[in-house]
Image (spheres, grey):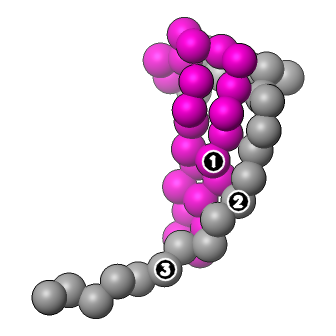
Amino acid sequence: GLLTIPGASEWTIIISKQTDVTGPADYKQDMDVVRVSSPTQSLPLQ
């Protein structure tokens, strides 16, 4: 499954072997395949 942890300065993107996560209590970190962080950036409104 694809999960995200949003933050003010960066987001964490997680690819997990779990496909049945419907809430934080269901998530098991040991099932992560990969976890990456990406900085946030503001975009100008047009």
Check the image and report above or below for 34 versus 13: above
The local crowd at label 1, few if under 14, some if 14 to 19, many if 20 or more residues have their Cα within 10 Å, is some
The stretch drawn in magenta includes residue 38: no
Q: Which residue extends farthest right?
A: 30
Disc 1 element:
strand
Residue 21 location, quadrant: top right
Q: Is residue 25 visible?
A: no
Image quadrant for the N terminus?
A: top right
- Residue 39 located left or right of residue 43: right
Check the image and report above or below for 11 versus 2: below
- Count the labels in the image: 3
**Magenta stretch in the rendered image:** 1-23
**Which residue is under mark 3?**
41
Marks 2 and 1 in Cβ contact (< 8 Å): yes
Question: Callout 1, which amino acid?
Answer: Ile
**Which residue is under mark 2?**
37
CA separation in Å, label 3 and label 2:
13 Å
Q: Residue 45: image x %, image y %? A: 20, 86
Residue 7 location, quadrant: bottom right
Question: Callout 3, which amino acid?
Answer: Gln
The local crowd at label 2, few if under 14, some if 14 to 19, many if 20 or more residues have their Cα within 10 Å, is few
CA separation in Å, label 1 and label 3:
15 Å
Residue at the image position 53 percent from the left and 73 percent from the top = 40
Residue at the image position 28 percent from the left and 89 percent from the top = 44
Q: Residue 33: image x %, image y %? A: 79, 30
- Closer to the chain start, of discs 1 and 3, is 1
Question: Callout 2, which amino acid?
Answer: Ser
- Closer to the chain start, of discs 2 and 1, is 1
Q: Which residue extends farthest left?
A: 46
Check the image and report above or below for 25 versus 32: above
